[in-house]
Image: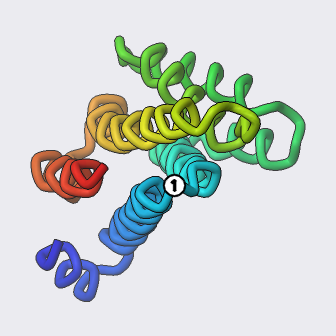
Amino acid sequence: MEALIKAAQGDRERYGGTLYELLYNLYNLTAATERWRRKDYKAAGEHVAQVVESDSIGTCASLDSFPLVEEWESGKIDFETYASRLADLLQGKGIATAGQYKRVMLAARTFGKEWDGSAPKAQQALAARAAIEGAAWCTVATRTIREAATGRPLTVPLKDYAGIIQGIVGRL
């Protein structure tokens, strides 16, 4: 992480977006785990939704497919349609795991956006935990997906990124 911060100071154009995305995901996953530990499961889910939405936007941007994001953000399509189109785009780039990525992303986001506060607390705890772990998987998986789809190497090595994310999720 320290190396990325130094690199971003020297070349903000190349590393600034990556650093922002990393910090955004670290903040939201950490906040989600803290909310989970405090039994505020709905808030944990809200942070999870922010992670998967942000990562999907970053994936679209890396594929030069920002018009898809604009369709969703403007309300022309819902998130499920957006996720399906993103998966189709990824499959067209040869990403065999695109369908799996879409399903996990939708499940994690749905817990955050359509929270069932009337469910028993034990069920809410499991739902929030599953959502956090799903978002963690998505944020790591999207790195390899982007690299494979674009042919551009990752600015943060996957081993380092995954290690940071696993450290956060390990606190559950």
**The quadrant where residue 93 appears:** top left
* Total residue callouts: 1
Question: Residue visible at 51% across and 54% down?
Answer: 39
Mark 1 Cα shell of 10 Å, populated few (<14), some (14-19), many (≥20)? some
Is 81 or 92 nearer to us in this picture? Answer: 81
Q: Could you say where residue 32 lies in the image, as x and y percent from the top left?
A: 47, 57
Q: Find residue 2 and report its horizontal and vertical position in percent.
A: 14, 79
**Residue found 19% across the figure and 47% down from its top:** 162
Look at 17% across and 84% down and name the residue there: 6
Judged left or right of residue 172, residue 110 is right
Foreground residue, 33 or 104? 33
The spot of residue 75 in percent (x, y) is 88, 42
Q: Quadrant of residue 78?
A: top right
Asked if residue 126 is positioned above or below residue 59 in the image, the reply reads above
Query: Mark 1 — residue?
Result: 39
Q: Position of residue 99 (x, y in %)?
A: 48, 14
The amino acid on which the numbered mark 1 sits, given as a three-letter code, is Lys
* Residue occupying the far bottom of the picture: 9
**Visible residue check, residue 146:** yes
Q: Nearer the viewer, residue 45 or 18?
A: 45
The vertical placement of 64 against 123, above or below, is: below
* Scheme of colours in the image: rainbow
The residue drawn where x is 20% and y is 53% is 161
Secondary structure category for the residue under label 1: loop
Q: Quadrant of the N terminus?
A: bottom left
Q: Nearer the viewer, residue 38 or 161?
A: 38
Q: Is residue 57 visible?
A: no
Q: Is residue 21 above or below residue 109?
A: below
